[in-house]
Image (cartoon, rainbow, N blue to C red):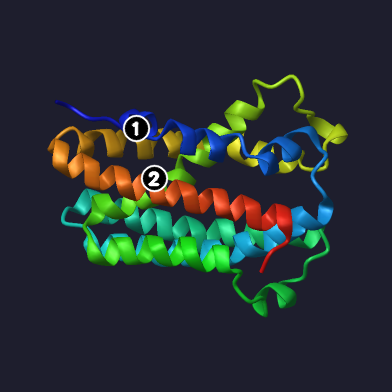
Amino acid sequence: MTYQFDDLKNAYPEEWQAYIEHRFVRQLGDGSLAPDAFRHYLKQDYLFLIQFARAFALAAYKSATMSDLRQAKEGLQAILDTELDLHIRYCSEWGISEAELAELPEARATLAYTRYVLDTGNRGDLLDLHVALSPCMVGYGEIANWLNTRQETRRGEANPYDAWIEMYESDEFQEAMQSEIAWLNEQLADVSPKRFEQLGRIFRDATRLEIDFWEMGLNLSD
């Protein structure tokens, strides 16, 4: 049997739907999300990106081929040279200074998810790590696409969070998402049913931790 990334989502449809269609996401899409909830999310997402960069550094260490090594290097470089700077500027637009970001403590949901990803990558191989990252790397693109199918979603000046949707519906992010799916499909095609079950548990747990990350933003929890 040949597996693909969609098989991971299909194995845990309730968790995936709860993540993609979370109340935080719905409220972000229709513009009703409380500004303080979005600010709290933005702050923690900055801290998440730092750990995400570490995960790509770990991916480089785990890479057995030049192709995988280059992929990890490009991901790390994109976060350090582009995404963090963009995030800092976006936070500034929401009244969050770079100095404040530098002093932030990590919320428990941030700690739980990012350390789970790094621990999974340390204990396992490159595929384990990518599967743990996939709810973020693929999920955010799917969320933007899902929001654009909803009549309730407001765009442009009518929605203070429109720039967030624009970021993840962009050609650049959608191409990166499809590239990640293609890599996962290639790797999953060769795994045994037992190995797929192991990867499925990683995917399920990472998705649940992403749900907790939305809850953290929505409830302003630390």
The residue located at (33%, 50%) in the rendering is 202
The residue located at (56%, 57%) in the rendering is 82
Mark 1 vs 2, N-terminal side: 1
The residue located at (48%, 55%) in the rendering is 78
Q: Is residue 70 visible?
A: yes
Residue 75 to residue 172: above or below: below
Identify the image quadrant of residue 13.
top left
Which percent across, then down, holds residue 40? 72, 61
Which percent across, then down, holds residue 200? 30, 42
Identify the image quadrant of residue 103.
bottom right
The residue located at (45%, 44%) in the rendering is 135
The residue where tag 1 is placed is 11
The residue where tag 2 is placed is 204
Amino acid bearing label 1:
Ala
Viewer-nearest residue: 21 or 148: 21
Viewer-nearest residue: 79 or 6: 6
Which percent across, then down, holds residue 60? 28, 62
User: Would residue 63 be found to the left or right of residue 87 on screen?
Assistant: left
**Answer yes or no: do the residues labelled 1 and 2 have beta carbons within 8 Å?**
yes
Which residue ends up furthest to the bottom in the rendered image?
103
Amino acid bearing label 2:
Arg
- Disc 1 residue crowd, few under 14, some 14–19, many 20+, Cα 10 Å: some
Residue 142 to residue 206: above or below: above
Q: Which mark is on residue 216? A: none
**In terms of secondary structure, where does tag 2 sit?**
helix
Give the position of the N terminus as an image quadrant: top left
